[in-house]
Image (cartoon, rainbow, N blue to C red):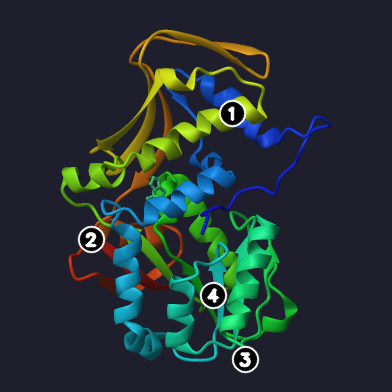
Amino acid sequence: TTPKGLKLVERDAGGVDTAFRADVLAGLAEEQKAIPARWFYDDTGSQLFEDITQLPEYYPTRAETEILRARGTEFADLIGPGRAVVEFGSGSSVKTPLLLQAIAPSAYVPLDISGDFLRASSAALAAKFPGLPVFPVEADFMRRVELPGEIEGLPKLGFFPGSTIGNMVARTATDLLRSMRETLGVGALLLIGMDLIKDEATLVAAYDDDAGVTAKFNLNLLTRINRELAGDIPVDAFAHEARWNDTYARIEMHLVAQKDVTFSVSGQPFAMVAGESIHTENSHKFTRRTSNMLLAAGGWEPRARWTDSEDRFSLLLAEA
Ligand code: AVI
């Protein structure tokens, strides 16, 4: 599933996504050029992300799924039946059913910015759980979301797997956690995935696989800019790079110019020298303490924590 969660799409008279153009033009004008990671996920990018989750080097999806499979009884004990599960994102075809099977909820409410995606995944989920009411909501969950009247009064469980919170800088992550609390209400629970700090080689390999799928995923952003924003970026002049930033405990993805280049996007000229990069993604990694701190900063009290058998990934349960 595509991890998304920002503004609903607004287009100008020429059909251009105005937020995409604004982010790209502003980001390319910065001293350290940077484009927000949310723009990876056009159709090609979403498919490439699916492919990434199957790569031998990309352990997070497998590790989190292992936890969901193994800990169903403990989830059921701590969370109990009868909750409305509110998923931030459209839901994954594997992880969401594992959770729903484990805890026997009363309703399922997926929130997603992309209506098409939401309808498709909701239909698939409803078919799998015939007795479960499903109420999809098309919304930007970075802000408080009005939940459907049908689930009023039900205790809530927020679900945000995948360590997508790690793609946000601390300030944005905290804002999101606070919005989730406003959406779900005091007394709600949140089950959230956070990837763990580990040896640098394993982390870098997860974001720079041998088959080159992550490189394709990163470079696709330039192809998307050229197509949607009338750009002429020489895509072949850029190389994918994954680096560990130890100060912020994150993997950064960059697109590094292999020679001096000039190009234009939406009529604006840009120049880069060889070795200069466009920073395209942060993927923060956590320890038990830093994940607890982040949750607390966002208004959530940590209640339980699980890791996979190799201690690569964590799922945390917190209470608002
Ligand atoms: C969606 N998100 C949690 C992924 C990650 O691991 O940060 C996106 C990704 N980027 C490169 N590979 C995967």
| For marks 4 and 2 on the same chain, the one whose residue lies earlier in the sequence | 4
- Quarter residue 289 falls in: bottom left
> What residue is rendered at 24% in x and 69% in y?
308
Amino acid found under the numbered disc labelled 4: Val
Q: Disc 1 to disc 2, how far (Cα)?
A: 34 Å
**Mark in front: 4 vs 2:** 2
Using the image, tell me which numbered label, if any, was put on residue 225.
1
| For marks 3 and 1 on the same chain, the one whose residue lies earlier in the sequence | 3
Q: Disc 3 to disc 2, how far (Cα)?
A: 35 Å
Is the residue at mark 3 in contact range of ligand 1, meaning its CB lies under 8 Å from it? no
Q: Are marks 3 and 2 in contact (CB under 8 Å)?
A: no
Direction from residue 302 to residue 42 in the image, left or right: right
| For marks 1 and 2 on the same chain, the one whose residue lies earlier in the sequence | 1
| For marks 4 and 1 on the same chain, the one whose residue lies earlier in the sequence | 4
> What residue is rendered at 40% in x and 22% in y?
238
> What residue is rendered at 19% in x and 64% in y?
311
Q: Is residue 190 visible?
A: no
Q: Position of residue 227 (x, y in %)?
A: 63, 28
Q: Position of residue 33 (x, y in %)?
A: 46, 23
Q: Which residue is mark 3?
A: 131
Answer few, some or many: residues within 10 Å of disc 3's Cα (few below 14, many 20 plus, some between 14 and 19).
few
> What residue is rendered at 57% in x and 59% in y?
179
| For marks 3 and 4 on the same chain, the one whose residue lies earlier in the sequence | 3
Using the image, tell me which numbered label, if any, was put on residue 186.
4
Q: Disc 4 to disc 1, how far (Cα)?
A: 42 Å
Q: Position of residue 10 (x, y in %)?
A: 75, 41
Q: Which residue is mark 2?
A: 312
Direction from residue 286 to residue 256 in the image, left or right: right
| Secondary structure of residue under mark 3 | loop
**Mark in front: 4 vs 1:** 1
Q: Nearer the viewer, residue 223 or 66?
A: 223
